[in-house]
Amino acid sequence: MIIGLLTAVAASACYGTGSVLQAVGSRKSARREAAEASTTGVTQHGGPSLSSTAKAAVTWEFMVGSVLDFIGFGLGALAARLLPLFLSQTVISANLVITAVLSIKLLGIRLTRAEWTSIAVVCAALVLLATAAGPEGSGHTPIAAHWWLLAASLVLIGGGTLIVRLLGGRAAILAGLLSGLGFGALGVGVRVLNGVAPFDLPSLLGDPALYAILVAGIGGMYLHTVALQIGSVNGATAALVVGETVVPGILGVLWLGDSSRPGFAWVAVLGFVVAVAGAVAVAWFGEPEPGTESDAPAAGQETEVATR
C-alpha cells in the first residue's frame, strides 16, 4: 500500500508539473502565431488547428512537459496495479493542486483564499481515501470486456476529437473532460492488462486492452493539449480530474472488485466525493472575472489564465 501511494504521488507530481510546462509552451506558440498574424492557427469554428497544436508541441517547455507526462504515465500505471482505482486515480488527479501552485510562478497566477481552501479540501479528502482504502481487486476479466474497452476508447477519442473541433473555442472544458475520460480508460486498461505479471509477450500483444491503452493515452494527451490552448489551465485540468476519477473509480468497485477497509466504506465514499468536489472548486474559483479573458480565445491568440 505504501509503495503504491508513493508511486501515485510521484505520478501526480509529474503530471502536474507537465501540465503547467505544456501550458507555457502552448501560450508561447499562440503568441508567436499572433505576432505573425497567422491565419492557419484556427479552424473555421475558432478552435486550434492541427497545425497550431503541432507547433505548440515542439516548444521546449511542451516537450519537457510531455516527457514528464510519460514518466507520470509509467508511475501511474504501476500505481493502478498496486492500489484500488478509486484511490490511485484520485491521488494522481490531485496533480491539479500541483498545477495550481506551480501556475503562481510560471503562469503569473495569484490564487485567492477560496482556491487555497479548495486545495486544502482536496488534500484532506486524499487523507480520508488513503485511510479507508482496502485491497485492490484481482483485475481478471473476460477477454470480451477488453474488446469493449477498446471499442469505447475508439469512440470516445474519435468522436470526442470531432466534437471538439466542431465546437472550436467553446470546447475547452469538454476537451478537458474527454481527455480525463481517456486517461481513466487508460487506468482501467492497465489494471486488466494480460501478460504483465507474470510477463508473457504474446499474451500482452494479443490483448485488446493494450491497444485501448495506446488509443486512450495518445488521444487523451491530444485533447488535453487542445484544452490548454483554448481555455484556463485550471479549468481544463479540473474537468480532466472529474473524467479521470469518477468513472474509473466506479468501475473499479463494481467491475474489478476494489474495496475499502471493513467499516470504512462511508469514509471512502466521503473522501472520493469531497476530492472531486474540491478539484472542481479549484477550477470554479480559478475562472477569470468577467471581462478579464476573452470568451473564446483562438489558438492564434494568447490565452490568459485567471489573474486577480
Image: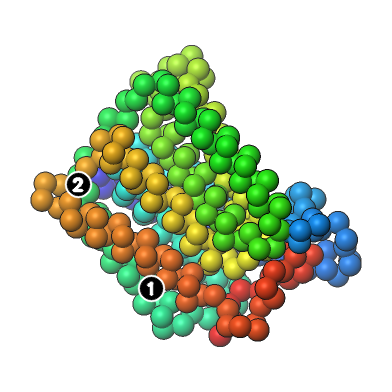
- Circle 1 — which element? helix
**Taking 143 as reference, is 103 left or right?**
right
**Taking 267 as reference, is 162 left or right?**
right
Residue in the picture at 34% in, 46% down:
249
- Cα–Cα gap, marks 1 and 2: 25 Å
Q: Nearer the viewer, residue 125 or 288?
A: 288
Q: Nearer the viewer, residue 21 or 295?
A: 295
The image quadrant that residue 23 belongs to is bottom right
User: Which dot marks residue 2?
Assistant: none
Count neighbours of disc 1 (C-alpha within 10 A) and say few if under 14, some if 14 to 19, many if 20 or more: many
Across and down, in percent, residue 146 comes to 44, 26
Quadrant where the N terminus is found in the figure: top left
On screen, residue 141 above or below 269:
above
- Circle 2 — which element? loop
Disc 1 residue type?
Ser
The mark that comes first in sequence, 1 or 2, is 1
**Taking 72 as reference, is 131 left or right?**
left
Across and down, in percent, residue 103 comes to 55, 71
Across and down, in percent, residue 126 comes to 30, 60
Q: Is residue 14 visible?
A: no
Residue underneath mark 1:
118
Toward the left, the furthest residue is 263
Residue in the picture at 32% in, 70% down:
121
Residue underneath mark 2:
260
